[in-house]
Image: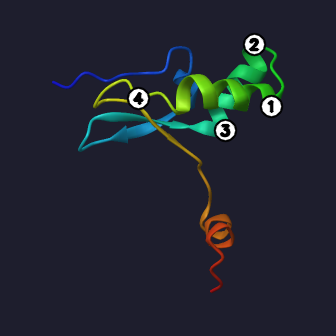
Amino acid sequence: MSEYLTADGFDKAIIGIEMYSQRVIYDKYLMCEVLMEEDEMSEEDAIDFLSYNVWGAYVGEHTPIYVDVMDADYFKEFIGKDD
C-alpha cells in the first residue's frame, strides 16, 4: 500500500488521486478559499502564502499535485485555441 502525502488543513480542496503515482490532487483555488475563510486572509495573501510555502515545495516522490481547475471553454481560451 502506498503512503499518501497530504497538505495539512486542506482536505476540503482534495479533488482526486493520481492513480499511477499515488499522489493526492488539490484544487489550488479551493486551497485559497480555505485560507480566506478559516484564516481570514485576503485572496492575494492566500496566493502568496501557498505559492511560497506549499505549491513549490517538493517533499519526495509522493508530493501532492496542485492544479488550476478549468472547464473546456476556459481551457481553450487559456491556450488561445478557437473551435
Question: In the visual, does 25 lie left or right of 53?
Answer: left
Q: Secondary structure at mark 3?
A: helix
Nearest to viewer (mark 3 / mark 1): 1
Instruction: Write down the residue under mark 2.
Output: 39
Q: Residue at x 69, y 30 (%)?
A: 32
Residue 13: quadrant of the picture: top right
Instruction: Write down the residue under mark 1.
Output: 43
How far apart marks 2 and 1 lie (CA) works out to 11 Å
Mark 2 or 4 closer to N-term? 2
Mark 3 or 1 closer to N-term? 3
61 in relation to 9, above or below: below
Q: Residues within 10 Å of mark 2 (few under 14, many from 20)?
A: few
Nearest to viewer (mark 1 / mark 4): 4
Question: In the visual, does 68 lie left or right of 38?
Answer: left
Question: In the visual, does 19 lie left or right of 74?
Answer: left
How far apart marks 1 and 4 lie (CA) works out to 24 Å
How far apart marks 2 and 4 lie (CA) works out to 24 Å
Q: Foreground: 42 or 24?
A: 42
Q: Residues within 10 Å of mark 3 (few under 14, many from 20)?
A: some
Q: Residue at x 20, y 26 (%)?
A: 2
How far apart marks 4 and 3 lie (CA) works out to 20 Å
How far apart marks 2 and 3 lie (CA) works out to 15 Å
Instruction: Write down the residue under mark 4.
Output: 58
Q: Residue at x 31, y 24 (%)?
A: 4
Amino acid identity at mark 4: Tyr
Q: Foreground: 3 or 51?
A: 51
x then y, percent, for residue 39: 75, 13
Mark 2 or 3 closer to N-term? 3
Q: Which mark is residue 29?
A: 3
8 in relation to 44, above or below: above
